[in-house]
Amino acid sequence: MGEAAVVHATLDTKLVSYVIFVYLAAVVFYISYLPYRTKTLGRIATGTLLLGFVVHTAAIIARAVISYKLGWGHAPFTNLYESMVFFSWSIALLYLILEWKYKNKVIGAFVVPWAFLALAYTSIGPGIRTEVEPLIPALQSNWLIAHVITCFLGYAAFAISFGASVMYLIKARKGEKKTEKGKKREKEGFVDYLPDLKVLDEINYKSVIIGFALLTLGIITGSAWANYAWGSYWSWDPKETWSLITWFIYAAFLHARYTRGWQGKRTAYISIVGFAAVIFTYLGVNLIISGLHSYA
């Protein structure tokens, strides 16, 4: 069983390495789609991403199977490598749903790169361990799956809101010029093909709602997990503190929209700041600040 586990573990990491290049190809196709806008190129971009997502899913399942074969039996979310793999998978999943809903492939040029970068980090990032390992005592809890899944799906939703916000600011800055009243407006290159500002604002808003709800659940389940592992629901650990800061940023986004009617550029800027906080909460805290979550 030991040799079989090693073989499967090697296959698992190889699958992830293949997906990195497939996602890179998808990024190239989505970016190439911006100036050409051909149906064939769009189908190739989506098909490439979908292929990578299927293999990506297989890699996650394979890693879980490895753990069970080794007698450890845990979900593959327990270290930085596994969490990055799942984060990338979550972004690809939510983007594919988004593309299906809005029937617009231009958004992929601003969202799919995050799925690629998250996965590429697993091969170049410092402190990345690809071995399948047994759970440390602090992670041996049924709260693990609920906490990690809700947090990372929330992070993925925030990545989409970030992409929509960047597109909104680019399009709002360029504007839509008109040659003469009643005549066809002048083309402005790829900016002309970005979704309408109203659609981008809607994507930003809805993505933040989804991400905020999931992050809230993640904090709640994390508190329950902390009480189980360390005997306290909240200890102001750096990751807990930054998770709360991130939560407050997106809470401010929703509060400003509901009570003051903020839309467009204002909420786009808040979304970008919020995603910067997400990245620091996830990676910055792990790499720079030591704490109870340092094992992640």
Image (cartoon, rainbow, N blue to C red):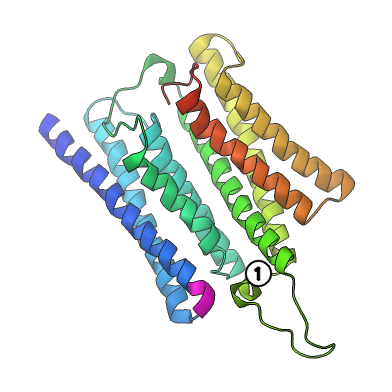
Let me know if residue 42 is in the magenta part.
no
Using the rendered view, name the quadrant where residue 141 is placed.
Answer: top left
Q: Image point 38% across, 59% down: which residue?
A: 24
247 and 101: which is toward the camera: 247
Q: Nearer the viewer, residue 200 or 283?
A: 283
Vertical position of residue 41 compared to residue 4: above or below = below
Quarter of the view holding residue 194: bottom right
Image vertical order of residue 77 relative to residue 176, above or below: above
- Residue at image location 16% in from the left, 35% down from the top: 6
Q: Nearer the viewer, residue 274 or 94?
A: 274
Question: In x, y percent, where is residue 163?
Answer: 59, 55
Which quadrant, please, contains the C terminus?
A: top left
Residue matched to label 1: 195
Based on the displayed image, in which of its 4 quarters is residue 55 positioned?
Answer: bottom left
Residue at 78% x, 82% y is 178
- Residue 162 position, x and y percent, is 62, 51
Q: Quadrant of the N terminus?
A: top left
Q: Secondary structure at mark 1?
A: loop
**Range shown magenta:** 33-37
Total numbered circles: 1
> Is residue 272 left or right of 262 when viewed as pictured?
left
In magenta stretch: residue 35: yes
**Residue reaching furthest top?**
231
Q: Amino acid at mark 1?
A: Pro
Q: Is residue 246 left or right of residue 38?
A: right
Q: Residue at x 49, y 25 (%)?
A: 288
From the image, give the main secondary structure of the stretch colored magenta.
helix
- Give the residue at the far bottom of this rendering: 183
Label 1 Cα crowd, 10 Å radius (few <14 / some 14-19 / many 20+) = some
Q: Where residue 222 sits in the image (x, y, percent)?
A: 56, 24
Q: Position of residue 92 (x, y in %)?
A: 47, 54
